[in-house]
Image (spheres, rainbow, N blue to C red):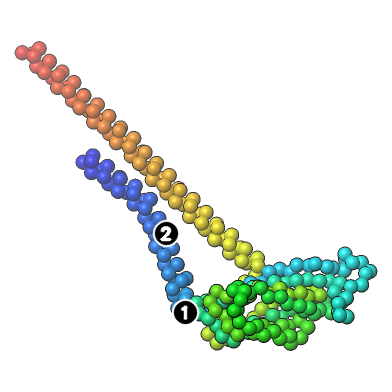
Amino acid sequence: MGETKRMIGRFVGVVVVILPLLFGVIIGLITETYTHWLGSWYEAKEVRCCIEGVTEHVNPEILGDAKLAFNGIDIRRLCSYRITVLNSGKKGIDNITVYVEFIPESNPFQILADHHKTDPPRNFGEIEISRDANSIISFGYELLNAGDKDEITLLTNGKGEIKVSGKQKDVKFVRIEHGAKKRAKLLEYAGIIIMVIYIAGGIWFYRRIRHNRGRLIALQKESEELSNELKEVEKKDRDAYGNLTN
């Protein structure tokens, strides 16, 4: 009976630790399958546009009353914006256009220049650049293979809210703010830390169960030995009493 209880306790201890870990692994596998398999099946064409915040290089407060112009354009305020266009899907995309529009905080406002850093750096394909207005620019990509990336730096003579959009059949456009990207990374790291803590806690709990079970088994053995000794003493007392009465 005692051995059966010990086996049941050992089984319960293992289940308490292993079952949550097994459940977490199953959930992780399901999520991974959905992300990499079902996601690629239903959303094979996806373009992500990551927008970083403005970097101000020159401003009127620094220049004071000094004049600064380039080709007749006032550049007393000089800002740059970075936009990353990435084909994050599983298939190549032909003839896709990405539109960038600024809502200026003040006028005059103009997009002065654009610089492209592509990955791969060679054989990326042609980029057709079109400026519809002082605050609107579009980039037409001849071909974006899976994983192709274009880091665009835009130079402007003012600040403004930036909007990035695109429209093409069967292509999903995802806009990611730079802060949101950082928060996503932080959440990912937090998830890893929580998982490590959970596993460490499970191991510690399992070891405590084993330790306590070992102590319990030792106490049970001691109790059985004491019980046997008491029985031996009682038997000797009964035999001695019987000898005296005889």
How far separated are the C-alphas under marks 1 and 2?
Answer: 25 Å
Q: Residue furthest right?
A: 65
Query: Residue at (23%, 31%) from the top-left corner?
Result: 224
Q: Dot 2: within a 10 Å radius of its alpha carbon, few (fewer than 14), some, or many (20 or more) residues?
A: few
Q: Is residue 158 above or below residue 15?
A: below
Q: Is residue 200 above or below residue 110?
A: above
Instruction: Please name which of the two marks, 1 or 2, marks the residue nearer to the observer.
Output: 1
Lateral position of residue 44 relative to residue 216, left or right: right
Q: Which residue is mark 1?
A: 42
Kindly indicate the quadrant of the structure image that contains residue 52: bottom right
Lateral position of residue 135 relative to residue 239, left or right: right
The three-letter code of the residue at mark 1 reads Tyr
**Residue 169 visible within the image:** yes
Lateral position of residue 218 relative to residue 62, left or right: left
Q: Pinpoint residue 16: horizontal percent, then vertical percent.
A: 36, 51
Q: Please name whichever residue, 224 or 235, is drawn nearer the observer in this view of the structure.
A: 224
Query: Nearer the N terminus, badge 1 or badge 2?
Result: 2
Helix, strand or loop for disc 1? helix
Query: Residue at (47%, 75%) from the top-left corner?
Result: 39
Q: Is residue 227 above or below residue 116?
A: above
Q: Please name whichever residue, 195 or 213, is drawn nearer the observer in this view of the structure.
A: 195
Q: Pinpoint residue 24: horizontal percent, then vertical percent.
A: 42, 59
Q: Residue furthest front?
A: 122
Q: Which residue is mark 2?
A: 24
Q: Dot 1: within a 10 Å radius of its alpha carbon, few (fewer than 14), some, or many (20 or more) residues?
A: few
Query: Residue at (52%, 54%) from the top-left corner?
Result: 193
**Residue 86 visible within the image:** no
Helix, strand or loop for disc 2? helix
Kindly indicate the quadrant of the structure image that contains residue 188: bottom right
The three-letter code of the residue at mark 2 reads Gly
Q: Please name whichever residue, 156 or 178, is drawn nearer the observer in this view of the structure.
A: 156
